[in-house]
Image (spheres, coloured by chain):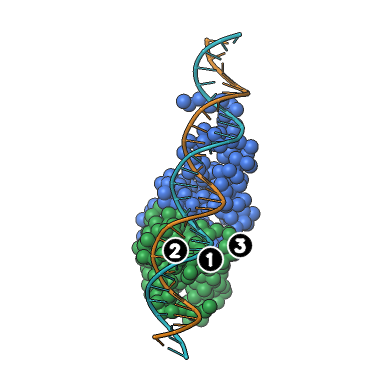
Chain colours: A green, B blue, C orange, D cyan
Amino acid sequence: MRALTRKGAATRQRILEGAAALIRENGVADTTLDDVLAGTATSKSQLFHYFPGGREELLLAVARLEADRVLEDQRPQLGDLTSWPAWQAWRDKVVDRYRRQGRLCPLNSVTSHLGSRTPGARAVVTELMRSWQAEIAAGVRHMRDAGEIGPDVDPDRAAAALLAGIQGGVLIQMSTGETTHLEAALDMGLAHLRAGGARAGKVADGL
Amino acid sequence: MRALTRKGAATRQRILEGAAALIRENGVADTTLDDVLAGTATSKSQLFHYFPGGREELLLAVARLEADRVLEDQRPQLGDLTSWPAWQAWRDKVVDRYRRQGRLCPLNSVTSHLGSRTPGARAVVTELMRSWQAEIAAGVRHMRDAGEIGPDVDPDRAAAALLAGIQGGVLIQMSTGETTHLEAALDMGLAHLRAGGARAGKVADGL
DNA sequence: GATAAAATGGACCAGCAAGTCCAAAAAGAG
DNA sequence: CTCTTTTTGGACTTGCTGGTCCATTTTATC
């Protein structure tokens, strides 16, 4: 049963990407299976052939696709947080990415629609957050080892805070359409790291 | 037409609160109008009598209700950010509130479900964010005037960053179930303010 | 080229949930 | 007490959308 012709694989991919595109444009709620069919020149039997779980399975696949995109769109900067200019470059890339994306956040849209019914949806997001945070933490660790950040800073916790700021910034952007909050959060997070990371009580002087 | 008997007002309220309770418990997607009817001992004609716009209007009303709750649940601490202990108390209250709330975030649930169809939904969130940020900013301003924070800190931008951290922390909690990120974001934000706000890089551009 | 497996087309079904309607009961006004 | 307005009950309609089914065509394999 694990057979899958080249043609079949192509069709599956076409459906998946077509669905993702539609959702990115119109949101999940306004994207029916028939829309996907029409938009990808496929028939219902094809969709259910490649996604036996129907709508739910398709949506989950789209979620995975979008989750991958999120990290990919931050490369290569995300994997190279080894100097302050590099951090700044990453920050700019993140802001730019979400500014382009506009109000719609396909991943949030999909997962909040699948909601609690599908544990898989949560897993996708959780996993994304985990690796995202891990990469940021690696950067913090690098800077700490390089002596740019005080040794008392917990990389994971700092990364968690930074990540939360990003997520919140994007969430707010979904309502306001502005990236103001995203930028403020990132800038504050970076400033805090640069200041040596809360060496409790001590204000950065030299630098 | 602006007639509304005492009995009528009570019924309307019963429907609204019943709907909110159901949504808080089961999420928007799994809450049908019939569920609301059953849960509030009302009939369909009543629902459409008091909410002529049907489901959409009801959901919007629920969104407003939940938005109000968010700020109310932070009082009186939110309005009294006048000392570091007070800030800490507020921080604890926020964490506690969302820890209690658990994975489900009714407001996010409702608005992301109404999505882009209803501009009103966005407006509710935007307004909530605006006043939330304003109250935080007032606190920052107070601390700055008291000399606890450097004069070069932009209260609005600091508040924006803090707010983004909160939102992101809650968002992540919706997947992970943990308040780790929320706490990390708040703690970092407060630490940063406490450290004097150490020159937050960019020039402020307000909201 | 024959046979099996996969891919495709599209009609059809079923259920649900939003919304409509009309008639009856209750409440208010005078 | 009567007349009007509001409130209520609940059956009914309707449209949409996810999902099923089977016949047909195409592709792989030997």
Identify the mark nearer the N-term, 1 or 2: 2
Residue B23 drawn at (x, y percent):
58, 48
Residue B10 drawn at (x, y percent):
60, 31
How many badges with numbers are in the image?
3
Residue B170 drawn at (x, y percent):
55, 58
**Residue at x 40%, y 75% (from the top left corner):** A10
The quarter in which the C terminus of chain A is drawn is: bottom left
**Dot 3 corresponds to which residue?**
B177
Q: What residue type is disc 1 on?
A: Gly
Question: How much space separates mark 3 and mark 1, taking CA atoms?
Answer: 26 Å
Q: Kindly indicate whether the residue at mark 1 contacts the one at mark 3 (C-beta within 8 angstroms).
A: no
Q: What residue type is disc 2 on?
A: Lys
Q: Chain of mark 1?
A: A
Work out whether residue B83 or residue D2 is closer to the camera in this orientation and state it.
D2
Q: What residue type is disc 3 on?
A: Gly
The mark found on residue A44 in the picture is 2
**Residue at x 41%, y 79% (from the top left corner):** A6
The mark found on residue A53 in the picture is 1
